[in-house]
Image (spheres, rainbow, N blue to C red):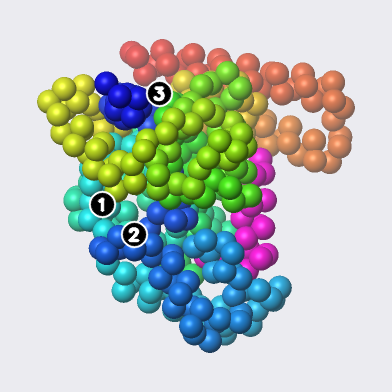
Amino acid sequence: MSLQDSNLELCVNYLSEGKCILFLGPQFAIDQEEAKVHEKIRTHLQSSSFKEKLDFHYDNLYIFNQPKPRTGDKMRLHIELKKQYQQAEPHQVYDKLAEIPFSAIISCSADGFLKDAYERKKKPLHFCYFSRKGGTSEEPAQPDMPILYNIFGYIRDEDSLITTYESFFRFIISVMGEEQQMPLELRNRIVEAKIFVFMGFDFSRWYIPLLVHKLNSFKGEESETTGLVDKGNVFDDKAASFYPIEMLVVEEESIDTIEALHTRLQSPEFQAQATIVPKTDPLKAVKTLLTQDKLEDAVILLKSVYEQYQVEDDSVILLEARLNGYKEKQTKGTISLADGAVEKAKIIQTVLDIIKELAEEIAA
């Protein structure tokens, strides 16, 4: 078996375990002619009235080159971008992607090509996207379905698009910060993943390493993850030095990589061992968040477990109130570092006690 085949087989193995996440880069979106959609849109905008108004150095982000563009111009740009995406005819490779059991897909594009493919194939999907206003999904992600997260917003929601320097840097700060707007279940999938597959990235772009470092940071220092890159990426040894994970190379274009994975997944061997997306053990995920010093996220997830199993107990409500009181004292500076550490330790122990009791109740 060649090294390339070995790398693909490694990916297939973790696909079967639900531990493989796909990252679609800004340069991935392709149409029926195998042309880059973002390049077609850029060419169109450069020959329009937007030519002198936009900064075209951000791949598939079309950002106004003035600090405060006119509202009318922003509205007209959204209308034009929406029209261009609607007119694009997505490549059939999206249908094949929808049949590959990635536990999650993080897309650096505002299009709905892959979302539409899941709908055509009648495949279950939890779709959500980044928005400065938050709340882009009414329901929490179910553990047994893949997640598609448009990290650059969604073309059908004007308020989610990144079209100004201000919105771009607010996006960077939000993603990099502690209070990042990313679904908790998606973060759990990232924690459990063993393979990150990258397609359509220019790894020399300054903001791409920031995104990868942040997403990988959810896993903690002890966890090991491997990246898989194909020729659909701009990648070399120098670029590799900026990233926190080992990168395995596949000498194929992205379309061919997808075709190869899709073909392997049709084999009887894979079908016998595959599970679409194994259910995440939510209580284990709560403990993982505690080890990562993400106490607030742990309590939020624990509360959702209570709701899922319809537990008639006010322990988690009291726990949440105690955590809010602790945070308020921290904000006001009315608790010393020593007392704060003691209170935090007590809250963590309460979380662990509730997990133990809940696990016993669920098992019974």
Residue 147: x, y in percent?
38, 43
Task: Please tell me whether mark 3 or mark 1 is closer to you in this view.
Answer: 1
Above or below, 364 against 257 in this view is: above
Determine if the magenta segment contains residue 357. Answer: no
Q: Residue at x 61, y 82 (%)?
A: 52
Give the extent of the magenta segment: 161-178
Q: Residue at x 30, y 24 (%)?
A: 2
What residue sits right under mark 2 in the picture?
Answer: 30
What residue sits right under mark 3 in the picture?
Answer: 281
- 320 or 79, which is in the foreground? 79
How far apart are labels 3 and 1 at the CA level?
32 Å
Which quadrant of the figure contains the N terminus? Answer: top left
Q: How many marks?
A: 3
Amino acid at pointer 3 = Asp
**Do residues under tags 3 and 1 come within 8 Å of each other at their CB atoms?**
no
Disc 1 element = helix
Q: Residue at x 37, y 18 (%)?
A: 362
Packing grade of label 2 (10 A; few <14, some 14-19, many >=20) is many
Packing grade of label 1 (10 A; few <14, some 14-19, many >=20) is many
- 108 or 29, which is in the foreground? 29
**Do residues under tags 2 and 1 come within 8 Å of each other at their CB atoms?**
yes
How far apart are labels 2 and 3 at the CA level?
36 Å
Which quadrant of the figure contains the C terminus? Answer: top left
Looking at the image, residue 321 sits to the left or right of residue 246; the answer is: right
Q: Residue at x 49, y 47 (%)?
A: 234
What residue sits right under mark 1 in the picture?
Answer: 93
Determine if the magenta segment contains residue 177. Answer: yes
First reached walking from the N terminus: tag 2 or tag 3: 2
Residue 236: x, y in percent?
53, 40
